[in-house]
Image (cartoon, helix red, strand yellow):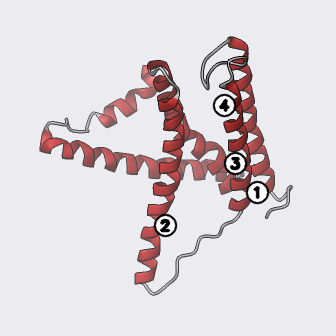
Amino acid sequence: MHFLTVFWKVLFAFVPPTEYWNGWACFIVSISLIGVLTAVTGDLASHFGCTVGLKDSVTAVVFVALGTSVPDTFASKVAAIQDQYADASIGNVTGSNAVNVFLGIGVAWTIAAVYWKSKGQVFKVDPGSLAFSVTVFTTMALVCVMVLLYRRRPSVAGGELGGPRTPKLLTFFMFLSLWFVYILLSSLEAYCHLPSF
């Protein structure tokens, strides 16, 4: 595992300690590195999708989303293990997705809109298959919330996380299958095998 992560360890060794400039140097360099790595990751995912013949929407739903969600998943697992209740781990999932959507898209689109408005042009983003994908995602999210509420019953698992082995595994495989169904439906719609909205 060290061999796979040595590049990242060396790269982030250039982040200054928090003692410099009351932590501002660390913050500025960290944010800059995150921005550069995000751009590189996005370009690599786009090139990979182009190489294997995937549409950008499918590449985004599968690879880019997976790349942004895996760290949040591990953070949620650590929170679930260390906290007595599931609030921190489930709150981390919803909070990180809210930041991705509202800041990740909102700030970038606002900057682009202001930039193009200053040039006398209008910034437009083609919605593509966004309505279909958001509808499928919302449906799957509601199913997940209903499952979590059902798990609260003492006769089932007694809480959102943990509990007896059988309900735990059933919940895991159900959530994993919902993710696969979401990817399948979004991909089929992107390639016009399903009607769009």
Which residue carries the number 4 mark?
148
Which circle's residue, 4 or 3, is located before the other in the chain? 3
Which residue carries the number 1 mark?
190
Residue 188 image offset from top left, x and y in percent: 81, 51
Which circle's residue, 1 or 3, is located before the other in the chain? 3
Q: Residue 130 carries which label?
A: none
Quarter of the C terminus within the rendering:
bottom right
Q: Which of the pair 138/192 is nearer the observer?
A: 138
Residue 148 image offset from top left, x and y in percent: 66, 31
The kind of residue tagged 3 is: Phe
Badge 2 local density, few (<14 within 10 Å), some, or many (20+)?
some
Which circle's residue, 2 or 4, is located before the other in the chain? 2
Q: Residue 109 carries which label?
A: 2
Which residue is at the far bottom? 120
Label 4 vs label 1, nearer the camera: 4
In space, the residues marked 4 and 3 are separated at their CA atoms by 16 Å
Which residue carries the number 3 mark?
137
